[in-house]
Image (cartoon, rainbow, N blue to C red):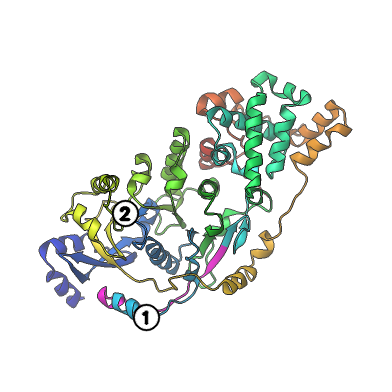
Amino acid sequence: MPEARAASAALPQPALEIASGYAFGGPALDLGALLWDGACLPDAQVRIPLPMLNRHGLVAGATGTGKTKTLQLVAEQLSAQGVPVFLADIKGDVSGISAPGARNEKVQARAAEVHQEWVATGFPAEFYALGGIGHGIPVRATVTSFGPVLLAKVLQLNQTQEQSLGLIFHYADQKGLDLLDLKDLRAVVAFLTSDEGKAELKNIGGLSTATAGVILRSLTAFEAQGMADFFGEPEFDTAELLRTASDGRGMVSVLELAAVQDRPQLFSTFLMWLLADLFHDLPEVGDADKPKLVFFFDEAHLLFNGASKAFLDSITQTVRLIRSKGVGVFFVTQTPKDVPADVLGQLGNRVQHALRAFTPDDQKALKATVRTFPDSAYDLEELLTGLGTGEAVVTVLSEKGAPTPVAATRLRAPESLMGPVEPGTLDSAVRSSPLYSRYAQAVDRESAYEKLGSRGAKGPDEMADEVKAPARRPKDAPARKPKDDPSVVEQVVGSGVFKSLARSLGTQIGREITRSLFGTARRRR
């Protein structure tokens, strides 16, 4: 330690002041070494306190500047500290985190520059794929669980159509009609616009034929693009993302999205469903020694493009509230301006890779990015255009929750494989997972489609009684409190969209908040 203090004392005064802002006493992740005046100063290490990882963050930078390797570097160290990690693999090259890295001249040179003791290491990983399209354990959601707000965004419905979709969900919830896959939803829409079904909604506004037609056409187009596989059972239990390996390291969950990257609205919204579903179930933990999960939301701008104000407000609320449940969310995108200001304001940790300034728009984005940083000893406008691959400007929250000084940083090299593993190796890992037998085979049990399809064999009253049966309350059960069964009017007035009803009594406050934000819900098995 005396040598370290002597080396620090030898730093230039501005660099010494910056380095002192990263001298944390508790557990922290090592990002790299400080850059000052064109030189790498390995005795000045730049770090992130582990307890601050649930204060969210942003990883930004132009294409090819090293964002993916930064995610890999952070994910490795989180796993080593026993923290589970979720990674969205847009390009299909993050699977290498499960395999030891390859030592070469570049890796050795980088490790020497930043005083890194580099050891080739693979980390425990599970591989998932949306609907099983691609290499991975299938991840599905039921339509009921996904909810009307997220589904409306995927279907690109306007506000009026979104409200009508909420009404459809409300009706299905009340009548015990399980919306498990898209054909269930289509069956309910068709029923509610039939002569028999119109009477069901006449007291609360009804469903116009024109709006129903738009929803049905949107569903048909959605299915024609191969989207039906993403909805159904067995539904993925997001608690799987919170697991640790037998050796105590956090499990790295890699969701492969390369096979569906031409459907950006789907995968970005599906990631939001994963996050909202986690929010349902996790208890409040406040400030903990380390996060329960760190969630990396890649290509984040796709989530915000074309989003309504209500949807953006919901995202902001979710990001703000999920911190107290021990979950950190890092948005990954090209520039901070891709993220709405209200969301950006919730992100305490920043890793900004190089930006390009070739066009007037680029120059405008550069100036906007500089303004989002605290005052700095650097000329950030010049610095951000001159950073090399694997270098970034960093500011994080200290152990006391205050922003650290802005630090130009030469980042460490990941210790796992910087690239994809072989397809055969990946498939073998997927099939040997204990989760494979649980989720691989799709199930199609009786739901709204079958119940409504059989109505022709019964009288209307008999069919209605059968549909309502699941919602009946036993005679000796206590009466519901009014707050547990809000009226449709209250839902509309309060939010502008209809929300799914709470499906069980005694739910946690946080769970009810999330349902009020996104209308998502899970039928417990």
Mark 2 neighbour class, 10 Å CA radius: few under 14, some 14 to 19, many 20 or more: many
| Relative horizontal placement of residue 173, taking residue 150 as reference (left or right) | right
Q: Residue furthest top?
A: 203
Three-letter amino acid code at disc 1? Asn
Say the numbered circle drawn on residue 350: 2
Give the CA separation, mark 2 to mark 1: 29 Å
Mark 1 neighbour class, 10 Å CA radius: few under 14, some 14 to 19, many 20 or more: few
Percent coordinates x, y for residue 179 in the rendering: 69, 41
**Tag 2 secondary structure:** strand
Observer-side mark, 2 or 1, equals 1
Percent coordinates x, y for residue 177 in the rendering: 73, 37
Residue 396 or 524: which is nearer the viewer?
A: 396
**Residue at screen point 41% across, 55% down:** 288
**Residue at screen point 64% across, 25% down:** 210
**Residue at screen point 52% across, 54% down:** 261
Which of the two discs, 2 and 1, labels the residue nearer the N terminus? 1
Residue 487, compared with residue 315, is above or below; it is above
Is residue 89 at least partly visible in the picture?
yes
Residue 207 or 445: which is nearer the viewer?
A: 207
Three-letter amino acid code at disc 2? Arg
**Tag 1 secondary structure:** loop
Q: Quadrant of the N terminus?
A: bottom left
| Relative horizontal placement of residue 380, taking residue 476 as reference (left or right) | left
| Relative horizontal placement of residue 334, taking residue 378 as reference (left or right) | right
Residue 3, compared with residue 231, is above or below; it is below
Residue 68 or 176: which is nearer the viewer?
A: 68
Residue 463, compared with residue 239, is above or below; it is above
Is residue 176 at least partly visible in the picture?
no
Label 1 sits on residue: 104
Q: Does the magenta stretch include residue 246?
A: no
Q: Give the range drawn in magenta.
A: 111-127
